[in-house]
Image (cartoon, coloured by chain):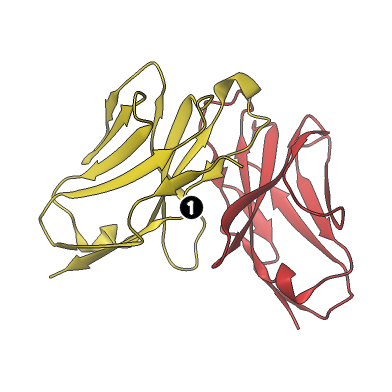
Chain colours: A yellow, B red
């Protein structure tokens, strides 16, 4: 079936640098996208979301970019801190489903922060 | 406000047994969805409930079932446990519109021996 995937299983960055985590999706019906952060022993934590009528959305130190033409999603984290170490997942769902379809998750990227 | 609460946090069961997991959503949230997380398959959608009705179900065998109560609390049940059912089971709650964010609980770690 269709799925949402991430390009890299592991990403290592220096503390203070910017991080970019990428995600490719294949479901053309996807119109709502979410980035989650999961720390060891915890459930996924909501970071930022974006709807398909937007191509960019900013939060605190995070930016999500959506390119519907190539079905690509990215998460940018500015000035990466040790507390950003976690596994990051992108997820998608068709808004038209009214929430019934659940989320389709990518496989996750483990972000490692080096001092 | 209180988050999504899942109980128990950890569970060890024997093959062939059955198990029931519980999820209390954020107050006011009417949708509860369940996910299975394993190292090999990642996060996979099990089913979603809204106002006590299952609206959708993922690609899992009939041994996996659930229900939702009038207070939006949900339970999922797995019968005739198999070793491969060992996983972290997560539930997420939302208002139910499909684009209002999904808040996850910390999960129940199920180990089948």
Query: Which residue shows up at 39% across the image and 40% down it?
Result: A24
Secondary element at tag 1: loop
In the figure, is residue A27 to the left or right of B64?
A: left
Q: Is residue A110 visible?
A: yes
> Which is more toward the observer, A49 or B93?
A49
Q: Residue at x 70, y 66 (%)?
A: B8
Q: Position of residue B5 (x, y in %)?
A: 63, 53
Callout 1: chain: A
Image point (62%, 51%), residue name: B44
Image quadrant in which you'd find residue A81: bottom left
Q: Position of residue A23 (x, y in %)?
A: 36, 43
Q: x, y percentage for residue A80?
A: 18, 54
Query: How many discs appear?
Result: 1
* Residue B82, quarter of picture: bottom right
Residue B11 in the image: state x and y as whole percent.
72, 74
Q: Quadrant of the C terminus of chain B?
A: bottom right
Relative height, residue A15 to residue B113 (above, below)? above
- In the rendered image, the vertical position of residue A24 relative to residue A53, given as above or below: below
Where is B28 relative to B20, above or below? Answer: above
**Residue denoted by label 1:** A44
Left or right position of B51 against A47:
right
Category of crowding for the residue at label 1, using alpha-carbon neighbours closer than 10 angstroms: few (below 14), some (14–19), many (at least 20): many
Among the 4 quarters of the image, the one containing residue B21: bottom right
Taking the view exactly as shown, the residue that stands out farthest to the top is A53
Horizontally, is A30 left or right of B46 in the view?
left
């Amino acid at each position: 079936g269709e799925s949402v995937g991430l390009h890299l299983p592991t990403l290592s960055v220096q503390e203070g640098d910017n991080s970019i985590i990428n995600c490719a999706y294949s479901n053309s019906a996807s119109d709502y996208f979410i980035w989650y952060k999961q720390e060891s022993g915890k459930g996924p934590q909501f970071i930022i979301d974006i709807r398909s009528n937007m191509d960019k959305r900013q939060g605190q130190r995070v930016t999500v970019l959506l390119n519907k033409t190539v079905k690509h999603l990215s998460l940018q984290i500015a000035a990466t801190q040790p507390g950003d170490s976690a596994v990051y997942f992108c997820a998608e769902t068709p808004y038209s489903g009214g929430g019934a379809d659940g989320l389709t998750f990518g496989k996750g990227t483990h972000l490692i922060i080096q001092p | 406000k209180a988050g999504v609460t899942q109980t128990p946090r950890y569970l060890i069961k024997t093959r062939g047994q059955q198990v029931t997991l519980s999820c209390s959503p954020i107050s006011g949230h009417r949708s509860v969805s369940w996910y299975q997380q394993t190292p090999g398959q990642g996060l996979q959608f099990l089913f979603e409930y809204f106002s006590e009705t299952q609206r959708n179900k993922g690609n899992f065998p009939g041994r996996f079932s659930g229900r939702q109560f009038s207070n939006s609390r949900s339970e999922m049940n797995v019968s005739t446990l198999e070793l491969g059912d060992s996983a972290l089971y997560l539930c997420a709650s939302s208002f139910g519109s499909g684009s209002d964010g999904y808040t996850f609980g910390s999960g129940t770690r199920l180990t089948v021996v």
